[in-house]
Image (cartoon, rainbow, N blue to C red):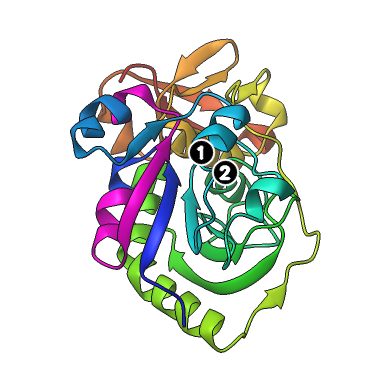
Amino acid sequence: MISKKIHLFTNELEIIKSLQSIFEIKKIFTEKIKLFKKLKKKNNIVLIRSYKDLMKDNTVSFETGISYGFGIIFKEDFLKKYKNGIWNIHPGSLPNYRGRHPITAAFLNDEKKIGLSIHVIDKKIDRGFLLAKSFVQRKYKDDELSIKKKLFKILKKVLKKAVANFNKKKMTKLQKGKYYKPFYKGINIKYSKKVDYKFIYNATKAQKSFDGIYVNGKKYYNAFFYSLKNLNKKNIELIICKNNKKIILVNKR
């Protein structure tokens, strides 16, 4: 049976709060200095700058690690330190949406549901063994933050299923699937008349939580489908898309 004591690798406070009700978090590893400063009084959080830092601070073997939104790739020699492996909480349906920003990729593909996958990591990105997976419904008003809130609501249930499946040795080898490159540089649509209006809408919603997108050389932060009602909103511009379809974009936060 898996122990409830874990090491956690994350850059997000919300995941720490969520997992505290399920596991006993013995140590937190983070790359985020703001999170480190906020929690350093607890004496169990470590600031990690590189893979070498991980190896220096974690010389003793431990049973289980859990990762969410952690940027450093775990190598095979590090994974071997964990008897039950390191489990990754991935906000996307594996193996269909591998990569750093699976929610954005799913938005761009106009998915109507977004997956939450929990898998045992191996040395390949978003591969290994799937322990559990579930989905939340995506509505067109959703952006990445609202989808994450939905995913966090089902996280406890999916984690419990993952623990049960691990104890029963019930897991599935993940296939190669589809890998999406990160969207660190954002999304730039140079000529809207060549692009489907839904793609522009979905791209804007996906990047609303970040720094918006560029369309026809200008930056926009939110989107609405074309209607006379939405034409009355503030700071908007009417954008002509492929097949003369129209969309409304917001040019200020």
Residue farthest along the front direction in this orientation: 60
Identify the disc placed on residue 178: none
Image quarter of the C terminus: top left
Badge 2 is on which residue?
A: 198
Q: Is residue 75 visible?
A: yes
In whole angstroms, how far apart are the C-alphas of marks 2 and 1? Answer: 5 Å
Q: Quadrant of residue 38?
A: top left
Q: Quadrant of residue 33?
A: top left
Q: Say if the magenta span includes residue 48.
A: no
Q: Quadrant of residue 175?
A: bottom right
Residue 194 position within the rendered picture, expressed as x and y whole percent measured from the top left: 72, 29
| Magenta-colored span | 15-35
- Look at 57% across and 68% down and name the residue there: 84
Q: Is residue 209 left or right of residue 61?
A: left
What amino acid type should be assigned to the residue bearing mark 1?
Answer: Tyr
Q: Is residue 95 above or below residue 14?
A: below
Q: Is residue 106 above or below residue 87?
A: above
Q: Could you tell me if the residues under marks 2 and 1 are in contact, i.e. CB atoms within 8 Å?
A: yes
Identify the disc placed on residue 201: 1
Q: Nearer the viewer, residue 96 or 226?
A: 96
Residue 180 position within the rendered picture, expressed as x and y whole percent measured from the top left: 71, 43
Q: Nearer the viewer, residue 71 or 201?
A: 71
Residue farthest along the left direction in this orientation: 41
- Look at 32% across and 65% down and name the residue there: 23
Q: Is residue 71 visible?
A: no
Residue 129 position within the rendered picture, expressed as x and y whole percent measured from the top left: 68, 69
Q: Is residue 246 left or right of residue 120?
A: left
Question: Is the residue marked by circle 2 packed among few (<14), some (14-19), or many (20+) residues within 10 Å?
Answer: many
Residue farthest along the bottom direction in this orientation: 168
- Look at 54% across and 55% down and name the residue there: 61
Q: Is residue 103 above or below residue 83?
A: above
